[in-house]
Image: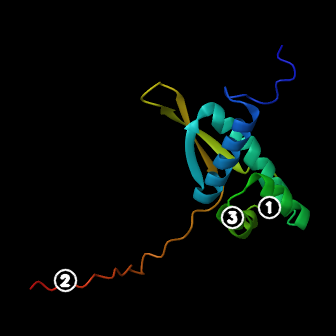
Amino acid sequence: MPHQNKVKKLSRTKPHREAMLRNMASSLIQHRTIETTEAKAKELRRVVDRVISIAKKDTLSARRQVAKTIESKVAFKKLFSEVIPQFDKRDSGFTRVLKVGFRRGDNAAISRVELLVEAPKVDKGAKKTTKKKPAADKK
């Protein structure tokens, strides 16, 4: 019976594992979904759910605790401005882990981790205008 094995070590040292999970959490908050191996996805779910639970308090202390994990300023701002308001009515279960398939190189199980937030709305009526560079005069 495996006692005192609360954390999957993922074949990494503690500082490497913590840095990797912090970076993956920032990427997940920025992009709403990421793909990774199944073991990393399950550990990432624990980290992100804990960060979101703390961030829902929205106090100075909570912001400082979240800043320890989410070091990217872009992800930090997006977490408090876009993600947290969508989780007002939800107490837990902020992420979803879906099994996608197997990696081609080493046949490792790949999973997709998603935040359970609504997709950003894209206005189909607005067209993007691109500026064309003026043609250079040939002499």
Residue type marked 1: Lys
Kindly report the distance in space between the C-alpha atoms of the residues bearing marks 2 and 3: 41 Å
Tell me if I can see residue 56 in this picture: no
- For residue 18, what is the image quadrant? top right
Residue type marked 3: Lys
Q: Residues within 10 Å of mark 3 (few under 14, many from 20)?
A: few
Task: Answer with mark 2 or mark 3, whichever residue precedes in sequence.
Answer: 3
- Residue 26: horizontal and vertical position, in percent? 66, 54
Please identify the residue farthest to the front as the structure is shown.
139
Kindly report the distance in space between the C-alpha atoms of the residues bearing marks 1 and 3: 26 Å
The N terminus, quarter of image: top right
Kindly report the distance in space between the C-alpha atoms of the residues bearing marks 2 and 1: 58 Å
Residue at left offset 85%, top offset 66%: 58
Q: Residues within 10 Å of mark 1 (few under 14, many from 20)?
A: few
Q: Secondary structure at mark 3?
A: helix
Residue 136 badge? 2
Residue 6 badge? none
Residue at left offset 61%, top offset 53%: 27
To which residue does mark 1 refer?
Answer: 89
Q: Residues within 10 Å of mark 2 (few under 14, many from 20)?
A: few
To which residue does mark 3 refer?
Answer: 73
Task: Check the image and report above or below for 33 versus 136.
Answer: above
Question: Residue 25 vs residue 129: left or right?
Answer: right
- Residue 123: horizontal and vertical position, in percent? 48, 76
Task: Answer with mark 2 or mark 1, whichever residue precedes in sequence.
Answer: 1
Residue at left offset 49%, top offset 33%: 101
The C terminus, quarter of image: bottom left
